[in-house]
Image: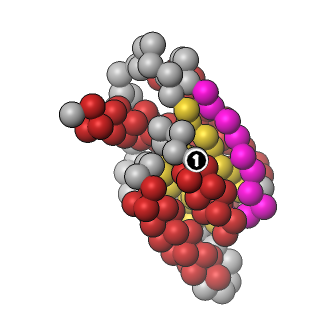
Amino acid sequence: MSTLLPPRPRQIIGSKRYFPIVASQFNPEYVQGLVNHATEELRALAPSATVTLHQAPGAFEIPVVVREIARQRKAHAILAIGVILKGSTTHAEHLSHSVTNALQQIAIEYGVPVINAVLSVENEEQAHERCLGKRINRGIEAARAAVQISSVMDELRAN
């Protein structure tokens, strides 16, 4: 696991982008922290971008919302945001694998980058560090990845 944020990409000036965020309503304090950090970073890196928020009941429902957005073929990258806290059973592990596989399949099928920021964490301490802190905040990381991959896809599609 990386303990530092990746370097900040170059700001996108003038190019209109659309970055929808699909966020789970479970673990709302942590998810909102990720959403806030991602939104702030997207606005800094792509000031003219449109950023929307769509809420899914839980992490398991995120892929169906992401699929609907991807199907419309308007998004430059979709950010999937959620927090799965491990419990005493293997449910969290199964849920995490299911969501990850579904998000990747959607990205491949529709050719729309999907940034997977559905975190699977062991405990509240890890959730706090990754969702509310600044040093390794996965919301900031997701926004940076969305901006970078949208630029890469623009370059590839221009040729």
140 displayed left or right of 127: left
Kind of residue indicated by mark 1: Gln
62 displayed left or right of 143: right
Q: Which residue is located at x 69 percent, y 65 percent?
A: 61
- Helix, strand or loop for the magenta stretch, by majority: strand
Which residue in the protein does label 1 denote? 72
Q: Which residue is located at x 61 percent, y 85 percent?
A: 90
The answer to whether residue 94 is above or below residue 134 is below
- What x and y, as percent, mark residue 116? 50, 55
| Image quadrant where one finds the N terminus | bottom left
The answer to whether residue 46 is above or below residue 73 is above
Query: In the depicted view, which residue is nearer to us: 69 or 82?
Result: 69
| Image quadrant where one finds the C terminus | top left
- What x and y, as percent, mark residue 34? 63, 43
Q: Which residue is located at x 73 percent, y 64 percent?
A: 58
Q: State yes or no: residue 54 in magenta.
A: yes
Range of residues picked out in magenta: 50-59
Query: In the depicted view, which residue is nearer to us: 16 or 89?
Result: 16
Q: Is residue 52 visible?
A: yes
